[in-house]
Image (spheres, coloured by chain):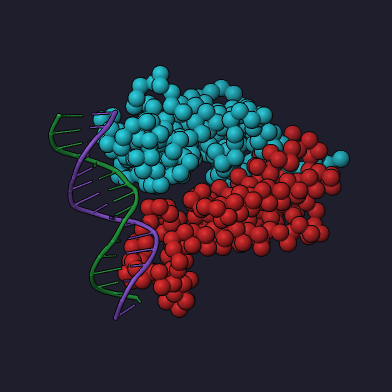
Chain colours: A red, B cyan, C purple, D green
DNA sequence: CCTACCGATCGGTAGG
DNA sequence: CCTACCGATCGGTAGG
């Protein structure tokens, strides 16, 4: 249940990620969390400042994973269609490798306050822009259809890769690469049968 | 704020839908809800049995809207590609017309218990099947590429139409029909530029 | 629909 | 990391 080889603080964050993702932030009490770690409620405060700190760290962890996976692609040399396939792969990989924190990130960020809340809304703009720029790049390269609306195209791509947190099950028969390739094939080539 | 022409019980459900969607189910207290309606906390219980009843009704309302919009299409005569476009339109229309209850439906259903919880998981299977059957129908008709995986294709379509609850803003420049047509054009025809 | 109240539980702290 | 505790708030009820 709890990986006792990790520092206690990381164990707490792991447990919090799991419980927050399963039950939600507000429906998880500090005593639920302590019980999951085999300690008393008050003992948690020897390691952390408060409940919201846990949410902040989980959300920051998730957004950092996305950033580190995607942003190096901005200056990558491949054509935009290959880059899009790779971005989708990396994006889904982050979701798959961080199911708990990704779920908390998508579901519970609205419960943040102040600067942490603002950071998430700004992060979303950054990711939107990343995908829109990638689409515009592909249109400029003549690789994507010229009539694409970068905003709607980015929305579609983001829908696909983000929604994976709802249905993807790590350890199942599909790897993140499988999912990304399926999606990229369908998106790039279209669902319609080629004219006969 | 509150539409005073409606029966009180509907006003309560409307307020609950809005507050639950903005703050989450557990972060909304019955006193928050009562204050939004200009009454005292205890007075709510003259109209409802308990807090979970509100969540159940909101979630049931949302799933019913989806059912009523989509299921008549099962026996519709159009080719599957046209049917898919129409299904996406209706699906997004339901989201757009019910932003609050759709948001609560997607975010808070895990807080249901017993039969209400089970009903939601079964509903998801039903919708999955609806889209998979639609894809398989299109493949059988020769309208969709023969190598499509109905499961992954349904996942992609569902990602697109469901994720709209995150970013769509009713009253903006895009109607649900606009969004559906953009998405259907991209999905059916693909993002790649046609060979020159 | 209000007042007044119930037991339970919440996040967090003091002192060891 | 535990024991014992704090004030605040929770969903819900009784009686009017």
Tell me which corner region of the image, top left, top right, bottom left or bottom right, holds residue B80: top right
- Given residues B83 and A121, the one toward you in this image is A121
Judged left or right of residue C9, residue B141 is right
Tell me which corner region of the image, top left, top right, bottom left or bottom right, holds residue A60: bottom right
**Is residue B82 visible to the viewer in this orientation of the structure?**
no
Question: Does residue B152 lie above or below A46 as drawn?
Answer: above
Disc count in the image? 0
Judged left or right of residue B128, residue B56 is left
- Given residues A75 and A173, the one toward you in this image is A75
Q: Quadrant of the C terminus of chain B?
A: top right
Q: What residue lies at 48% left-to-right and 71% top-to-bottom?
A: A10
The location of residue A111, given as percent across then percent down, is: 48, 50
Question: Does residue B193 lie above or below B177 as drawn?
Answer: below
- Given residues B78 and A48, the one toward you in this image is A48
The location of residue B41, given as percent across then percent down, is: 31, 37
Furthest-top residue in this view = B5
Question: Does residue A84 lie above or below A195 as drawn?
Answer: below
Question: Does residue A2 lie above or below A155 as drawn?
Answer: below
Q: What residue lies at 49% left-to-right and 31% top-to-bottom?
A: B98
The location of residue A91, given as percent across then percent down, is: 63, 56
Judged left or right of residue A80, residue D12 is left
Q: What residue lies at 38% left-to-right and 56% top-to-bottom?
A: A28
Q: What residue lies at 69% left-to-right and 39% top-to-bottom?
A: A152
**Is residue B177 visible to the viewer in this orientation of the structure?**
yes
The location of residue A133, given as percent across then percent down, is: 76, 48
Judged left or right of residue A48, residue B167 is right
């Amino acid at each position: 249940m709890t990986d006792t080889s990790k520092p206690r603080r990381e164990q707490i964050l792991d447990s919090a990620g799991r419980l927050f993702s399963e039950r939600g932030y507000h429906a998880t009490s500090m005593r639920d969390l302590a019980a999951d770690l085999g300690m008393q409620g008050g003992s948690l405060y020897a390691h952390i400042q408060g409940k919201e700190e846990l949410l902040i760290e989980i959300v920051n962890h998730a957004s950092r994973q996305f950033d580190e996976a995607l942003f190096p692609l901005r200056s990558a040399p491949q054509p935009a269609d290959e880059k899009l396939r790779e971005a989708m792969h990396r994006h889904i990989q982050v979701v798959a490798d961080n199911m708990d924190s990704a779920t908390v990130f998508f579901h519970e960020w609205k419960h943040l306050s102040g600067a942490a809340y603002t950071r998430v809304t700004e992060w979303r703009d950054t990711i939107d822009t990343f995908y829109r720029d990638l689409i515009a790049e592909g249109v400029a390269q003549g690789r994507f259809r010229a009539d694409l609306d970068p905003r709607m195209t980015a929305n579609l791509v983001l829908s696909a890769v983000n929604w994976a947190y709802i249905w993807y099950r790590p350890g199942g028969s599909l790897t993140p690469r499988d999912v990304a390739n399926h999606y990229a094939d369908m998106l790039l080539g279209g669902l319609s049968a080629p004219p006969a």
